[in-house]
Image: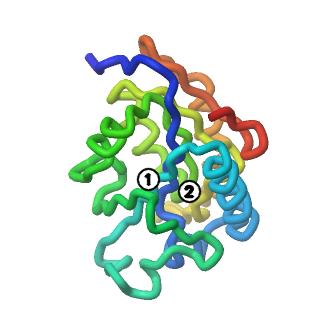
Amino acid sequence: MATIREGNKAALVVVDVQVGVMSGAWDASRVVDKVSFVVERARAAGVPVVWVQHSDEQLVRESPQWQWVPKLVPREIELRVHKQFNSSFEQTSLEGELATLGVTHIVLAGAATNWCIRATAYGALERGYDVTLVSDAHTTETMQLESGVKIEAEHVIQELNIAMQWLAYPGRKNGTASAEQVQF
């Protein structure tokens, strides 16, 4: 059973909005604008912004593809977490960093919806955090399956937004809000 985290201290967690991730993502420019907007809202409200950055054989650390998209630049004082798995919690410092800050509520934005955003959202809920997925500030690529079936990115995004409204975990709150509606 997960620990239920008392209080309501939020942090914005921005996942993998990197050049190589966003280059083929659906509606990437608009999503980057929404992520940038919610980052500025968090900063203005004094809410910590945590930047999670993926590396693997396709996103080689320090390569041009690994870098943040130009419009999103972490501030020196903002936390950075490096990961190698879909969940931002697996074998990273994220949970410890959030505990140090006293965070109980994660506001989540970034990419890729069906991999790292989903895994991070579920990982947060399983660890006792409340989660708000920024409904218009996450994206992914359209998938072409070997069977010939095509799963449109827009549908993947809609599905996770719906799932985050209907999931139920004891003692935790989860849902979605647009970048303009997010409550920190």
x%, y% of residue 162?
64, 32
Task: Note whether 169 is above or below 161 in the view shown.
Answer: above
Q: CA distance from mark 2 to mark 1?
A: 9 Å
Quadrant of the rendering where the C terminus is positioned: top right
**Which one is nearer the viewer's eye here, 111 or 179?**
179
Identify the residue under disc 1.
116
Circle 1: residue type = Cys
Q: Is residue 40 left or right of residue 64?
A: right
Q: Residues within 10 Å of mark 2 (few under 14, many from 20)?
A: many
x%, y% of residue 111?
53, 58
> Do tag 2 and tag 1 residues touch (Cβ < 8 Å)?
yes
Tell me where residue 25 sits by quadrant.
Answer: bottom right
Q: Residues within 10 Å of mark 1 (few under 14, many from 20)?
A: many
Name the residue rendered at 67%, 49% in the picture.
44
Quadrant of the rendering where the N terminus is positioned: top left
Identify the residue under disc 2.
110
Tell me where residue 66 sits by quadrant.
Answer: bottom left
Name the residue rendered at 54%, 52% in the picture.
113
Q: Secondary structure at mark 2?
A: strand
Name the residue rendered at 59%, 22% in the picture.
166
Task: Note whether 100 is above or below 92 in the view shown.
Answer: above
